[in-house]
Image (spheres, rainbow, N blue to C red):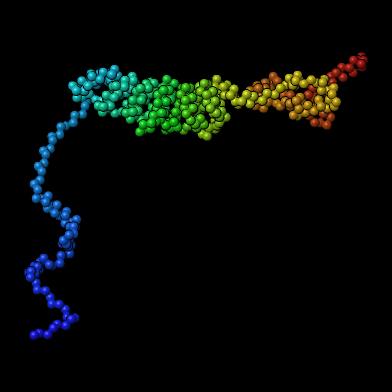
Amino acid sequence: MSAAAPEDAEPAAPIDTEPAPAAEATAAPEEGEPAPAEEGEPAPEGGAAEAEAAEAAEEPAAPEEPAKPTLPVHKPDPSKDIAANESFVQMAGLGQIDLMQAAMDSNPDISLEFETDDGWTPMSWAAGINNVPAMRFLDEQGAAIDNLNKYGNSAVRYAACNGKLEAVQCLLELGADCNMLQQNMYTPFIAACGKDRSIECVRAMMDYKGPQGGAKLHYESPSGKTPLHEAALCGANHVLKMLLQNGAKVQTENLWGRTALMEAVMYGRCEAIELLHQFKAKIEHKSTKDNLSALDLALREKQRLAAGLLQKLGSGDNALTRNKTILSTVDREAQVHVSKIINQRDGVNCFFNMMKPGGLLEVNELKPLTDGKLSLIERDYQEKGLLEDLNKPTDEGAGPDGQDKNWADVKHNHGKLEKSGRKSAAATPKKR
């Protein structure tokens, strides 16, 4: 009988009933390879991607579609058939859309951008005649909206300057730019501001809220053209008033230092001058470029009506060119009741005080002419001996102290001497 095992002895290891796993299976994974997933845990993402790639590799590839043959794109050559293209421009102006479509289908040399000798394209011709259906058809066929002709004008300018409101609205919807600089001088909006017949087109361009935005009220071209200056110098008074009512700055100078008032004065636009004056245009303002005022420009350009109007608007008596009127002694005396003043207490002193400098009856000193036309005439007469130089001292004018006296004293003394000499001669008998 064997002895009992101690209580703290370890239990015997269980007898293995299954064979041990192979060495390859129990080996640790090499560096860079994912560890095998335990039972009940999801497989890592990398392994799933490799599995999907393996499955996709086993599937057969889809057959590739054969490439479609590309046809050569034909570019119209209008020089081959100029007559047909000129006829196409006329069709656009008349709105003959069916004939336009038939011409394009039958003649590959019809060009949507063809330009006649006068600078007309199908789009600009249709815009100038206000043919909206033809314009929309040309846009659907791919015609350019803002294409410039050989004169540097676009279709929207022809429409705006001719007062074609529907055409302007259509072109703005199709993406035309009314602020595009043309000829380095104008934009379509500035050009339209110079004509009263285009006032509705001007308003439409100002109110447009499309992607490209409406007209720029204060835009200035490199040549110094602004909407307000253009309306003022062209005398488009209705457009000018609308621009001023919509916030146009009246005192803004252009590239040459001219305000809208100065531009109106230089071209003699009297109604525009009055309108600008109503909107607080400063008549006395001088240019920052040459320091000339509106009146200076009116006199230089010989715009007499404009100069007179500026004087009238220059606050009445303080007119810009009116000199202060100096009344003569007789005219001033007519405004005073002399006897009434003298008969009052201390009236004599009061009367003589009025004759002092600053008084109502001030006697102005007469100064000899030193320049001007009259002084030249006087000098010429003196050189020819036709006029005595009264300022030149004479022997008769010499006083007892040898000092010369003025002309008035000399004349007066000479007269007394002659008179006294005659008396003494008559009283003394002649010697025989």
Which one is nearer the viewer's eye here, 43 or 325? Answer: 43
Which one is nearer the viewer's eye here, 78 or 165? Answer: 165
Quarter of the figure with residue 6: bottom left
User: Residue 394 location, x and y as percent?
Assistant: 77, 26
The number of numbered badges drawn on the structure is: 0
User: Residue 39 location, x and y as percent?
Assistant: 16, 61
User: Residue 288 location, x and y as percent?
Assistant: 52, 34
Quarter of the figure with residue 384: top right
On the rendered structure, is 354 left or right of 121? right
On the rendered structure, is 366 left or right of 215? right
Q: Measuring 50% from the left and 22% from the top, which residue is drawn there?
A: 269
Q: Measuring 84% from the left and 21% from the top, which residue is drawn there?
A: 416
Image quarter of the C terminus: top right
Which one is nearer the viewer's eye here, 137 or 37? Answer: 37
Quarter of the figure with residue 93: top left
Image quarter of the N terminus: bottom left
